[in-house]
Amino acid sequence: MVDRTDILTRIEEELLAGRPVSDVLRLLIILGGRSGSSELRDWAKAELRGYQNDVETPAYRAVPALIQLDAIIGSAVVRHQTISVTDFPSVVSDKITETATFSHGVGELEALVRTATDNTINVSLPGSQELAKLLNHQANRPSQRVMSVYWSVSTSAVTGIIDQIMNRLAELIGELRASTPSHSEIPTKDQADRAVNVVINGSSHINVTAIAAGKDNDIHIEGGMKPSSAGSRFWTRGRRIGAATVGAATIAGTLLTAIQLSGGF
């Protein structure tokens, strides 16, 4: 049972002992309840459950992403071919960048790292099936067919996001410890809210800089890198540059509708 008068110390001990981030976040929710701080509770709950609905995902969960595809060329199967955003038709290329934001709960992030093979995690782009149709229509080569389009995720990037969450937990506890009088059992609501504003909503956010990717509708695109030309030669062979046919427009329209319904890339 958690000591009601010493919950800050308990959180510090759990964090320094390397306990699962989920356990520490649950203790933070309890602290937020006792202090009356909805901001403290809301941040901890979002990290536990994932950033859902209209809740904005923090910048520290954004990572650069590689776009890859699997395809069939004649009788051969090509896997993990890296392509550029410029390989997509112009009608959708400006909706895709090489930066993805993870909105998963921290437990799911930990599971992705734990179950990854070859230090990578492959996850579908939003509207991946329609994107594959657009690429096939654009190439117009019956012997060459894209089967799937996805991001290739480096486990080190996801680990980096988890580390960023832990860093903010430590910073929050430091702010709370500094602002809570030694004779007080718990911080006041104003003290807890102020700590969240300084650490979470302030200017101290650090973007993770590692190659990674996202997950289906749980991911949206922010910012972006300059498109890389690495690996793009493979699919540009046989492309019909500027082919804005009725068929491509129909597929693109379906894709853009799906993007709007899912909240966007």
Image (cartoon, rainbow, N blue to C red):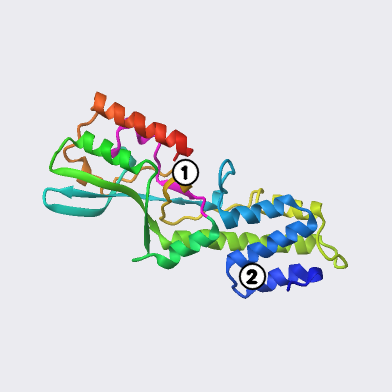
Residue at left offset 39%, top offset 56%:
153
Q: Position of residue 47 (x, y in %)?
A: 59, 56
Q: Is residue 213 among what the camera can see? A: yes
Outermost residue on the top side: it is 246
Relative vertical location of residue 143 with respect to residue 179 in this rendering, above or below = above
Per the image, is 91 magenta? yes
Q: Position of residue 243 (x, y in %)?
A: 23, 27
- The residue identified by callout 2 is 15
- The residue identified by callout 1 is 220
User: Which residues, given as a range, are shown in magenta?
Assistant: 87-104
At mark 2, the secondary structure is helix
Residue at left offset 25%, top offset 27%:
247
Q: Are marks 2 and 1 in contact (CB under 8 Å)?
A: no
Q: Is residue 14 left or right of residue 225?
A: right
Quarter occupied by residue 224: top left
Quarter occupied by residue 238: top left
Amino acid type of the residue tagged 1 in the rendering: His
